[in-house]
Amino acid sequence: MKILVIGSGAREHAISARLAVESGVSEVVCAPGNAGIGAVARLVPVDPGDPKALLDLARREAVDLTVVGPELPLSRGVVDRFREAGLAIVGPTQAAAALESSKAFAKAFMARHGVPTAGFALCTSAQQALDEIASGRLGLPLVVKADGLAAGKGVIIAETRAEAEGAVRDVMETRRFGDAGNTVVLEEFMTGQEASYFVLCDGAHAMPLGTAQDHKRIFDDDKGPNTGGMGAFSPSPLITADMDARVLRDIVRPVLAGMAAEGHPFNGFLYVGLMLTPAGPKVVEFNARFGDPEAQVVLPRLDESFAALLAAAAAGTLPERAARFSSEPRVGVVLASKGYPESAESGVPISGLDEAARIPGAEVFHAATAEASDGGIATAGGRVLTVVARGATFAEAIATAYRAVHAIRFDGMQYRTDIGRRAL
Ligand code: AMP
Ligand code: GLY
């Protein structure tokens, strides 16, 4: 089987690296990939935001199966194009990807199908939002969210009414997130611990694909601004067997059935962001793709053929069971550039990658890296690498991950020193 992987981050490196060593996979092609993915896949410089160019590529290369990593190609309808052309692909159609690309759609959908989530109001004008805030119906703190994609930055937790009003003006009048803020979602604030639950879907069947917890803030102890994710661990000790069954019954199955009933069967990776509240698990958000850095800690634990699962998902023949995993935990630490998340330095030489990869139990996935003119590897953006380690216990996995982190150096390198501590 020849497989095309779309994307260029550490998630796509983890997907490509895994597929490349599986029997039954003859070749992995990655568009556009990065310097690290180049070691496990053949890179082709095609824009992941251009569905037509991707379809041309898949045809030219006669790939048997395509898997989409990031959200952008999904929201541009790459899956619709491939399906129309009769090509096998894993991922949701543009309409189904609205579970991620429109928070307003996701909330209204959950309300229609009785999926537990925070109480909310959808507002299409600043006045409507200000009236809703004045009513006090949703209480304080109040969560203010831009409807559209805002790179994880479109969520404001307002402690006071004045802050909530300011956030609404910022999103709807100053248009801080552009068109993503045409509609605003106001939400009740939920309390509890957060965990991520992954499902591989084929439109009708849902296969649980592991759990994880991520670390969204830039600094230790969850301080500082939100990022795309500074580290993760898997599995989540919060998802006990009982909780797992509850999430499947109360959230995953109603979502799949609801999407199918509305004419948009969900195919691909469903990422369920959960808040484990005193009243039970509730949905914080959906993503229509695998998480990053979560994929880097979940996939290495998979104890069966990933390619076979992907092929079954594309064909609509996924078995009704959970994917099989090794019980060994994984911990992944993200190494980011100076200035991240506001800005990012590029072109800074990285050393110690080979040394880190030689540490038993450690592996390094590249995100924003590029080959330097001297043949070495340099930084090429905000999140540069994910260093992942396994261990018999979380403590061991954490120790090995940081031993590998300490082998790597680049100017301005920042990382959290507390990844995985919450699992102990
Ligand atoms: P989102 O982009 O919707 O996942 O939100 C980003 C983060 O904001 C989440 O991971 C939560 O930590 C927090 N958050 C979002 N919505 C709520 C809510 N209704 N109650 C409490 N925290 C929330
Ligand atoms: N780590 C969060 C995400 O992939 O959206």
Image (cartoon, rainbow, N blue to C red):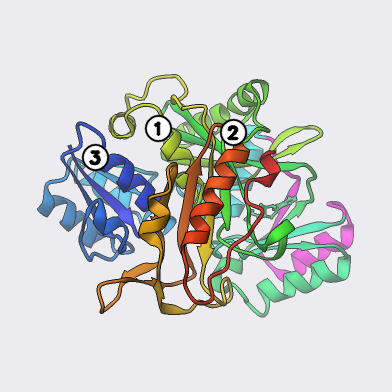
Q: Which of 263 and 220 is in front in this view?
A: 220
Report crowding for label 3: few under 14, some 14 to 19, many 20 or more residues within 10 A (C-alpha): many
Q: What residue type is labelled 3?
A: Ala
**In this image, 87 relative to 411: left or right?**
left
- Looking at marks 3 and 1 on the same chain, the residue that comes earlier in the sequence is marked by 3
Observer able to see residue 368:
yes
**Amino acid marked by disc 2:** Thr
Q: Quadrant of the N terminus?
A: top left
Distance from the alpha carbon under mark 2 to that under mark 1: 36 Å
SS assignment at label 1: strand
- Residue hosting label 2: 393
Q: How far apart are marks 2 and 3 (CA)?
A: 38 Å
Which quadrant of the figure contains the C terminus? top right
Q: What element carries label 2?
A: loop
Residue 168 at x, y = what percent?
73, 69
For the image, the number of numbered tags is 3
Whether label 3 touches label 1, CB < 8 Å:
no
Q: Is residue 20 above or below residue 32?
A: above
At which x and y percent is residue 98?
49, 50
Residue tagged by mark 3?
A: 88
Residue 307: x and y in percent read 29, 34
* Mark nearer the N terminus (2 vs 3): 3
